[in-house]
Image (tube, rainbow, N blue to C red):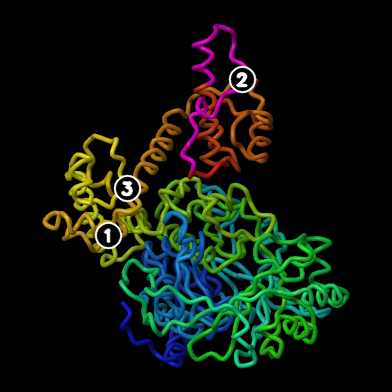
Amino acid sequence: MLTKKLPPLQSFLSLVSRRGSHLARQQYDVIVVGGGHAGTEAAAAAARVGAETLLVSQKIQTIGALSCNPSLGGVGKGQLVKEVDALDGLCGRAGDWAGIHFSILNRRKGPAVWGPRAQLDRQRYREFIQSELLSTPRLTVLEGSVEELLVSEPNPEEPGHHIVTGIRLANGSHLISASSVVLTTGTFLSGSLFLGQSMSPGGRIGDAPSSAGLSQTLRERLGLRIGRLRTGTPPRIVKDSVDLSLAHVHPPDSHPTPFSFLNTHTRCKPEEQLPCYLTYTTPGVERVVRESLHLNCHIQQETKVFGCHRYCPSIESRVLRFPGRQHQVWLEPEGVTSDLLYPQGLSMTMPPDVQLRLIREIPAMHRAEIHTPGYGVQYDFVCPTQLSPALQVKSTQGLFLAGQINGTTGYEEAAAQGLWAGVNAARWALSMPPVALSRTESYIGVLIDDLVSRGVTEPYRMFTSRAEFRTSLRPDNADLRLTLKGFEEVGCVSTLRYQEAVRVRDSLQDALAALQALSLSTHNWRKKFPDMRMSEAKSTLLTGMDVLQYNDVSFEMLASAFPECLLPHVEFSQRLKIEAVYRPHCNLQKKEIERIQKEENMSLPQDIDYLSLPVSLSQEVREILDRVRPSTLGAATRLQGITPAAIVHLLNYVRHTGQKERRTSKRPWRAHSTLTERELGRTQPNSHVS
């Protein structure tokens, strides 16, 4: 998968031009607006499902561009990349092709929260994405700006007040028809750029602003609730002007771990990887921020109206919120041949001359030169509670939204939404039922459920802590969770990938069966592995699966001791080790899920004092339950904002309190009974408390 030869950009542009010339006489199943991470995944996914698809982008050269940071993955975000890849998406393979620094974050914690991450070469990433789009059947690309959506009276047999029928380009005369439309406008929807005291229309520096007509259509014609969000980007620094000897070197992993399940290695060889560098802000940085506040209209508005974002905040916001602290600044390479560094952690919107003063307060950058200044962006987003789990606008048939238009931030969140919106847009156009992902089976499901059930008040970012069942939703098993479903139920996975996933599934099952069949006494296990820390007081039979759960036992050790039955499976040694460690936890979580489904009709006493209930529930969950007071557990599961973990705790409380009351007294059940943690039947310590 990593030996392909990418065509030059001119070939991509010329083919786009030829395809675009036929638009006047074509009808499309799906139109995707926007060529960022959400748009490219949406277009490719819709085409894979079987829909004739058109991707419309304002600027062909920027399709697949890394608009902000030159990296992919991370904690929570890496899980999304693995899941997009498992569903045959683009970004995982693009990351393996373009990566120049690979690492697994959270390595010292359990594998369920490991975060695959890579620094990327901007040019290589863009070229890979464009090459993939070029070779995707049923996909056409057009350069243009969308002025408005075409809508008409809805299909009376489906819910909704309107139905989308296509788009109108900004020249006002070119209408393109389609059965469904996916909007992935990023920061361009009525976007405004901020730099110092100046403001200009636009969603990304160097690109033309989007048409205001599209935002007006959403707001006035379709009646959608629209909000404003803010984000920003740091200045790009000339690499040769930075004294990297004054920063801490952060080397990559010695053995790069690919994102894609189809790849066994990355394009970049281990010895060719580039390091990153870590440095810190100084009191001088804080001084420059405070002295220049009157020159910074973006941060003035943020502190007065928007508040400080918790995720990806500007350096100005961080200094004002946490005075006197040092803040990390990561100096990241932008490519193998690039002469620029990306200072992660220094997003800023002050005037360019003040930005230069600020960065030179950091010792490693005391002589730094700025290539491109940082700036802020303010843009429209659609409140995502107006969407269905298929990412379709509830009030408009055939209209789907993905990416920052739904209030998220980050490439990975955008790509995940784009893929799922593209899948469902294609299925709508082809008269197929929509599909959904549960938050119990994927991080994509967690992301979408959080958006459509809770909405956002600031840009949404994925973390592993958002997934209640994260011990089951690991990076290593995304293919087994999603690839088979993607082929058999969704229709977005190729036969090649499906066959590989089936091979992996069958091989793992054979290996697990072989481990389970190995059964020895603890005495004999200690004889085989004298260094294994097994209690001598134990005297029982243990299987290979049991022994593999020990920290100091690897699958390779077992395979060397039992080569005939285990050596054929050494290819999956790490996956088998992880599976053995997490299997007990996953089995408990599976039982919890099944228990919730069985107990849907369990009555919830109407006198429960949810606000003081001695159970681990967030204040938000308590207030929702207290306000609605659902009559059954099933009714509680369907409330917006109620997580599966909250339902598990509620179920345990009601069941165990009822049992205790029946054992100890015939008096009526009371909500203020105090239980110990043992009586509450709490979930595993690793599971997320709502």
User: First in sequence: mark 3 or mark 2?
Assistant: 3
288 over 504 or under it: above or below: below
At x 55% / y 8%, what residue is drawn?
A: 665
Q: In the rendered view, would you say 504 is above or below 526?
A: below
Q: Position of residue 356 (x, y in %)?
A: 75, 86
Labelled pair 1, 3 in contact (Cβ < 8 Å) = no
Badge 3 marks a residue whose secondary structure is loop
Count of residue discs:
3
**Contact check, label 3 and label 2, Cβ < 8 Å:** no
Q: Earlier in the sequence, mark 1 or mark 2?
A: 1
Task: Tell me the number on the disc at residue 673.
Answer: 2
- Label 3 belongs to which residue? 533
Q: Is residue 668 magenta?
A: yes
Report the amino acid beneath label 2.
Answer: Ser
Where on the picture, by quarter, is residue 605? top right
Q: In this orientation, which residue lies closer to the viewer: 93 or 689?
A: 689
Quadrant in the picture for residue 139: bottom left
Residue on which the image places disc 1:
573
User: Which amino acid is tagged 3?
Assistant: Arg
Residue 437 placement, left or right of 68: left
Q: Nearer the viewer, residue 566 or 14?
A: 566
State which region is magenta: 657-685
Work out whether residue 425 can be spotted: no
Instruction: Please identify, in this view, whether the residue under mark 1 or under mark 2 is nearer the observer.
Output: 1
- Relative side of 321 to 435, left or right: right
Inspect the magenta stretch and tell me whether residue 434 lies in it: no
- Kindly report the distance in space between the C-alpha atoms of the residues bearing marks 1 and 3: 20 Å
Q: Which image quadrant: the N terminus?
A: bottom left
- C-alpha gap between disc 3 and disc 2: 43 Å
The answer to the question of whether label 1 and label 2 lie on touching residues, with beta carbons closer than 8 A, is no
The one of 614 and 88 positioned closer to us in this rendering: 614
